[in-house]
Image: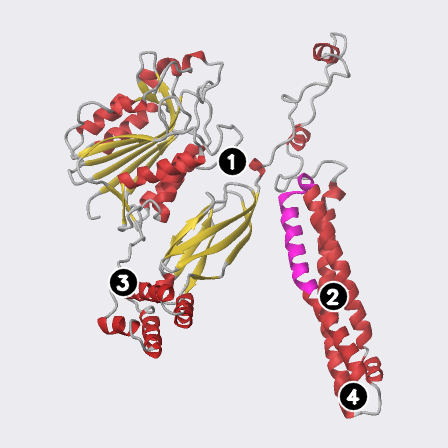
Amino acid sequence: MGESRHALIIANDSYQDEGLKKLVAPAQDAVALAGVLGDPGIGAFDVDVVRNEPSHVILTRIDDFFSDRRTSDTLVVHFSCHGLKSESGDLYFAASNTKPQRLASTAVAASFVRQRMSSTRARSIALFLDCCYGGAFSQGSASVRASGDVNVLESFSGERLGGGRGWAVITASNSMEYAFEGTALADDSAPRPSVFTSAVVRGLSTGEADLDEDGRISLDELYEYVFDHVREENPNQTPSRTVDMQGGMYLARSHRRRITASPVPENVRAAMRSPDIFTRRGAIMELRSRMENTDLSVAVGAREALEEMARKDIRSVADEARGALSEVRVNPYPTQVDFGPVPQHSPPPHRSVRLLGPPLARSCAPHPKRDWLRAVESSDGVDVRVDTSTPGHLSGDIVLKGVVGEAVLHVDVEVLPTLEAVPSAPTPETQPPPTNGKPPHEGIAADKPTPSEPAPEAPPAHEAEAERHPAREHGAPPKPGTSLKALRAPAVAAVALSLAITSVIMAIQAAVAATEAVQMRVADQWTPLAGHVQGTAMMPSLVVSLATALVGLILIALARHDLGSSDRLYAAQSARATKLFTRTAKLLAIPALVLALAIVIAFLIARRYV
């Protein structure tokens, strides 16, 4: 891909006009798409992101983007915003300053984008429109309610744009369908890329959109992949496209390669068909060796020959061929990845998973089964990343598919919510007044101060703030009356940790004492083992170890239960400390308990026979 490649990503998720609904996805769309297009190993585009800018700034950036291009340039433009239709039927893209009643002067006209596409000299242009058309507006704003179909693609169809080799427009939805953000157009949904852009990013980053496995992802392949993915996620959304392009347009590289099998040498083929069973078994040994060849075509040819013998030969030879096949399989290490607790919206953590075995076993592609999972091939395996935008315990699988089969890599992560992600208590402005059992209008009237009564004093600012954010604010004090309760779980967890440490120490002392008792018994065979045990004080240490381990495990369970049932009571730091203490205590208490029980069992056995 030696040509010059440029991408312009325009994302608007915040609007000055109250009639336009604030979108959740565009900010995430810009970050996710810019990352994959700008990756030198994937898109290798020079990416420019324009986010939440007024219309005149966006118009200038579009004009600059298409100007002074060469015929060999490849251009990609991505809109993620509201799409508006004027009364005359013209299509506009909303900017931060857009007024639905003044679209011509405050929005970006689709005709302007088309005109700039037509005037550029670049030969390959792709325009992606991930917009909500007509449905994502408050019903109180009659001026922005759409009538009839938007017919998005009609704004870019007609005569050839000219000037270049060709162009393509792909839209997230056709006509009046919603371009869904996740599974719904909800104001309070967690920030995440839209269904459409998620499919684009996933298809490019994983290489899954490389349908013919030739190492390159074409525009046609990406559209087919995105269409199937979006329809599977949401049958009510239908991506559409219009294309006027000669030849293909390639958007990204892919690590996927279709391996063409090399036929095995004729002498090996002859040995496979020999009537002598030992000669055929010798062929299996040769094919097993060829499967480990660094040339994957040679290895695949040997594997296909072994599969043929496993199907057609007699049972004993077929079983040996199947055994050779089973030795070369997709073998990730480790098979489970636990990221533990990570803060919400933190940089995506990543872990490396090695692929063991010969080159043929390591030739596989990762397929994440959850949108928050990311997996890309690395030099020695797979690099696993997680999206930290959604709080909660996330669990999912990555299927590693290769020529020799597939394996499942399980991933867990606990995304700790930030202050913004925790629902706050109702504010005085939004909380309905008490009605005292009366109809709403009567309750409101009764609660209003009369002219002769002074209005109730407003609470101090710090008390009002405490009422709005009672639990999860970092560093904020708990509400009056809850300070002791807010320390209950971490205190119990700290006690459990101290008991676990004590249990480990006492278990080690008991083990040392048990060893000394055995040595004393060997030196003095006239004294029973129990006497030597009593002399070394093993039993007190053992009893203390067992007791502290059991009590510690009980306190761990209590602390975890209290944290889970009273989650909003605890600040984020207290919750993290509780989880850290309980995990550490559990890692110490369980081995100490096992060691103490093992000493008890060994003593009972030794007492009987020694």
As helix, strand or loop, the secondary structure at mark 2 comes to helix
Q: CA distance from mark 3 to mark 4?
A: 67 Å
Labels 4 and 1: the sequence-earlier one: 1
Label 3 and label 1: CA atoms lie apart by: 46 Å
Q: Which mark is residue 103?
A: none
The answer to which of marks 3 and 1 sits earlier in the sequence is 1
Determine crowd level at label 1: few under 14, some 14-19, many 20+ residues with C-alpha closer than 10 A. Answer: some
Q: Which residues are magenta?
A: 566-590
Q: Are marks 3 and 2 in contact (CB under 8 Å)?
A: no
Q: Is residue 446 left or right of residue 16?
A: right
Q: How many numbered circles are shown? A: 4
Q: Residue at x 48, y 28 (%)?
A: 185
Label number found at residue 190: 1
Q: 512 and 326: which one is in front? A: 326
Disc number for residue 297: 3
Up-down relation of residue 564 to residue 468 (above or below) = below
> Dividing the picture into quarters, in which one does residue 472 lie?
top right
From the image, tell me which residue sits under label 2.
502
Using the numbered discs, state the Cα–Cα distance from disc 2 to disc 4 in whole angstroms.
Answer: 28 Å
Q: At label 1, which amino acid type do we have?
A: Ala
The amino acid at mark 2 is Thr
Kind of residue at badge 3: Ser
